Image: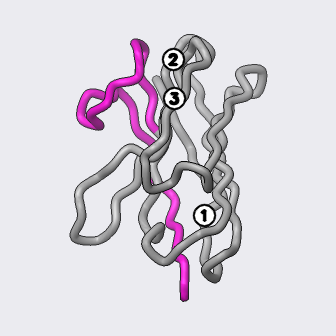
Amino acid sequence: QVQLVESGGGSVQAGGSLRLSCVGSGYTFSRYCMAWFRQAPGKEREEVAALGSDGATRYADSVKGRFSGSRDNAKNTLYLQMDSLKPEDTAMYYCAADPGRCPRLGYLMNYWGKGTLVTISS
């Protein structure tokens, strides 16, 4: 079965950096859309970054210029480099995968990890 395991979350001060990782197994990683979503308490889940199997990428407006997603298909790993972190970036970050093109709505993603918590203090 498909399994996604995130790591790299933690607590840092505003302006700091974190690098999240997601290791996928049980599927052909290179053929799947891989994406990062986040959900803060009391708020809706939102897409942060999506990386298609064809190399196409997109980012939420709120993180453009600060976050950079990448994927290493040889290692079945998805990354999210987060720089210039802000308190509003505080959320649970989830890795997601889908066998088709990257959906723009989270509920269309087929598979999800359990999440890794990111907390940014001011």
The x, y position of residue 4, in whole percent, is: 52, 37
Specify which label sits upstream in the sequence, 1 or 3: 1
Point 64% across, 52% down: residue: 20
Q: CA distance from mark 2 to mark 1?
A: 23 Å
What residue range appears in magenta?
96-122
User: Quick one: SS at disc 1?
Assistant: loop
Q: Which residue is mark 2?
A: 32
Q: Residue furthest bottom?
A: 122
User: Quick one: SS at disc 3?
Assistant: strand
Task: Characterize the local packing of mark 3: few (<14), some (14-19) or many (20 or more) Cα atoms within 10 angstroms.
Answer: many
Q: Quick check: 69 above or below 99?
A: below
Point 53% across, 73% down: residue: 86
The x, y position of residue 98, in whole percent, is: 41, 22
Q: Quick check: 9 above or below 25?
A: below
The x, y position of residue 75, in whole percent, is: 76, 27
User: Quick one: SS at disc 2?
Assistant: loop
- Name the residue nearer the viewer: 96 or 80: 80
Q: CA distance from mark 2 to mark 3?
A: 6 Å
Q: Type of residue at label 2? A: Tyr
Q: Which residue is mark 1?
A: 9
